[in-house]
Amino acid sequence: MEKATENALLCTHCGEPCITDRIQVDDKPFCCEGCRMVWQLLDDKGLCTYYSLNQHPGLNRRLPVRKEKFAFLDDEKMAAGLIGFRNEEETHLTLYLPAIHCSSCLYLLEHLRRLHPGILSSRIDFTAKEIFLVFHHRQITLRGVVELLASLGYEPYISLHDLGRSRPNANRDLIYRLGVAGFCFGNIMLLCFPEYLGLGSADGALRQVFRYLSLVFAVPVLLYSAQPFYISAWNGLRRQFLNIDAPIVLAILITFARSAWEVLGGAGSGYFDSMSGIVFFMLAGRVLQDKTYRELSFDRDYTSYFPVAVTVLQSEGDPVVKALPDLRCGDTLRIHSGELIPADGILTRGRAFIDYSFVTGESVPVTKTVGEIVYAGGRQTGAAIEVLVVKEVAQSYLTQLWNRQSDPAAAKPSFSFVNTLSRNFTLIVLLIAACAAVYWRLHDPEKIWKAVTAVLIVACPCALLLTSTFTNGNILRILGRNGVYLRNAETLERIATATHIVFDKTGTLTDASDPVLGYDGVPLTPDQQQAIGILASQSVHPLSRALARKFGSMLADAHVHDYREYPGKGVEALVNDHHWAIGSAAFVGAQTAAHDLPGSTVFVACDNRVLGSFSVSSHYREGLTTLVRRLGPGLRLSILSGDNPRESARLHQLLGKDTRLLFGQSPLDKCEYISRLQQHGERVMMIGDGLNDAGALSQSDVGIAVTADSNNFTPASDAILRADRLHLLPEFIRLCRAGRSIILGTFLLSILYNVIGLSFAVHASLSPLIAAILMPASTLSILLITYGSSNLLGKKLLSMRR
Amino acid sequence: MSVIILLLIASLSVALLFLGAFLWSVKNRQFDDDYSPSRRILFDDELSIDDDKMPEILN
């Protein structure tokens, strides 16, 4: 039996404190029936290694999964979108299980076939949190498999997004190219050594063999490995934009042409080793920079958040399950407890008690009565309701906002100071090449071709590309270790150049899941506090959770009888033979004061006597007071809030007088405020969390989604920031800016190398040996400097504040 | 000098073999998940995934 503290029993399955000691098997305590059932199932099948690999590996099963939730999987058309392969007997299936978190999960999920004979094998991809299943569909249906997983606490996440989606494999392609380039580079270098050491001249025939072999090895580098650069340069040119890849492609082509001409003409060994080396290192930099977070998704639209299908009531006959895109105005939906409202509609039956936490960041549910409009995106927390659809899914208030910019690449034009730098650099180099050509034309016309090609070879801005990709890659990694996950390297630069930061208030600056509770009423004895804590911990309502946390340290063995929950009203039970009720004023029979806001005040009554009320106020995240000071004077700040301005004084005190505060902002207002700022020439960084910020996040130059847990579903954004690291924002911005300085500094150094090379080149005396020494020397020193300095800076900025 | 040619051929074929092995291992998703294999080996006494069957399914 596990005991964390003296008087708190922890559930064997999930490790949460047990409310009662009545649910026990073999002296093992459980917090709820759900957990006990999972444990017994695993015990029956001899899978209890699950519990010995990690302490409390399970997931809380207090909220059972609704029986019909996965009914839509019986529909052939929907199932077909998920199934990877199916023949007469077997079905292959890949599912995303966000709950995977430890080796116990791995153990259990790979032993699924012991739980059901129909499952042939299961395999986990831990990084992607995916399970690959093979099962006999005659013995177990797709729905059965999904329900089995859900019953164990590993509920698969199935969204419209998954249906008919092909999985991207772009990065692997780059790795193949890198492998080929590395192979060719190494071999060409070996083949070149004899010549550099002056040994080749002894045997002319052997020297020719070596040279031709180098040529053969250089061909795959030119035709296969360097392809990404051709594509990028061509895409740039087509849009009349000279990016950094264009001069690089030019240099690669000219190096190859001149080297091939030398080898075939027997004049020399060419620069194949330098060429393939450069391609190899540039590809390595690109792989490093493009390493994205596979488990995170930055491109979520509403379809990945909404359910796949909903229950539609028909005037005659049984309710049917319909896919979201097939919903029409006038359909009546039945929304069960815990389900999302997929489209704007009018409540026609039941009492809606809607948690809009994902939409507004406000965790306190809102009550709606029949006839009122309910907006899509809310989660029903009470009993089942019926909703008449008045707007189709894609036209709903929020989804429309979310979809405003379906093509983010087009909305945000690509810009990078690296491209500007490389363009100027290239122009200067071309000028030098022209000068050299003119000079040799006057003095020794035979050397024009040699001098000009040598200049172009040396002048390739590959050093710039290397320093930018390696610096960016390393900074992305440092940020990732510290809880900021960026979509790509370009985001680094957008963060570095931002001039105005716009914060959302609720859920971003405040921690909605951890409200501050104020108490107003008769002083409570420890016994009473304990009783309130125990009663509150039975419920999953956010206010109850807050109460349970507040009094959680006093949980002890107590007898809870006749527990009853009334959605939208409150909870009641007999605790230690006293009747306790927690809930709204009407529920416990209290008088409401004028300043009490519905939904943010909860009343407590013992034996029908009202003791007092707890009211909730926002809890601001740690480190906010110093945040503004540490951000420095260069950045302007704004706060947008959907709330009323009752906390404006406190916000001013927290964030300084210069911060602009705007209250009562609708999602559309937020979006427009940002585009107004942009029209005034500001580069806006938006930091928000909910669906209501989705429009603003995509409108801004860089949108950062704040989330308590990176596995949660965040709106489409450029970066995902862990909420507990928000106070590190100034350091993150400084690191991004430092990255620019590193790139610039190393680039200046590389120009020094280029000047040395050019001095040989304009004399038309760039021997392959000099190129072969210059190339790796400059590359390696650049890599060392970028890597070392970015690591050093990252440590300096972030270590002290962790 | 012909011995050098022979050595060259030998070394190149070994190098090509390794290149092939590398490409195969990437294609076989051996670098995709760096967590599970190290844990999976710890429960091998109970677990017997049909390893000969998995690769063709995965590709």
Image: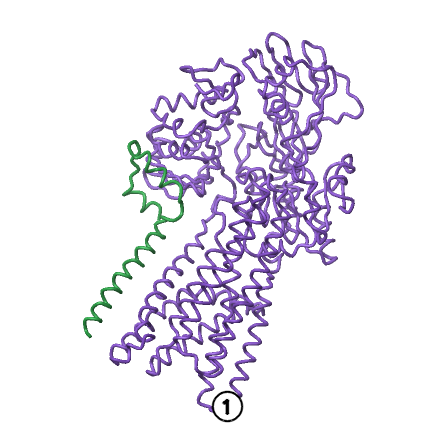
Chain colours: A purple, B green
Q: Residue at x 31, y 59 (%)?
A: B19
Q: Residue at x 72, y 44 (%)?
A: A639
Q: Residue furthest top?
A: A577
Q: Quadrant of residue A177?
A: bottom left
| A337 in relation to A510, above or below | above
User: Image quadrant for the C terminus of chain A?
Assistant: top right
Of the pair A747 and A683, the residue shown nearer to us: A747
- How many marks the image carries: the answer is 1
Please indicate whether residue A306 sits to the left or right of residue A776 in the image: right
Q: Residue at x 42, y 15 (%)?
A: A27
Residue A730 % position (x, y): 64, 48
The subunit letter for the residue under badge 1 reads A
Residue B26 % position (x, y): 36, 52
What residue sits right under mark 1 in the picture? Answer: A441
SS state under label 1 = helix
Please indicate whether residue A285 sits to the left or right of residue A570 in the image: left
Q: Residues within 10 Å of mark 1 (few under 14, many from 20)?
A: some
| A779 in relation to A797, above or below | below
User: Image quadrant for the N terminus of chain A?
Assistant: top left
Residue A46 % position (x, y): 33, 24
Q: Amino acid at mark 1?
A: Arg
Of the pair A459 and A217, the residue shown nearer to us: A459
| A769 in relation to A30, above or below | below
| A394 in relation to B1, above or below | above
Residue A121 % position (x, y): 33, 36
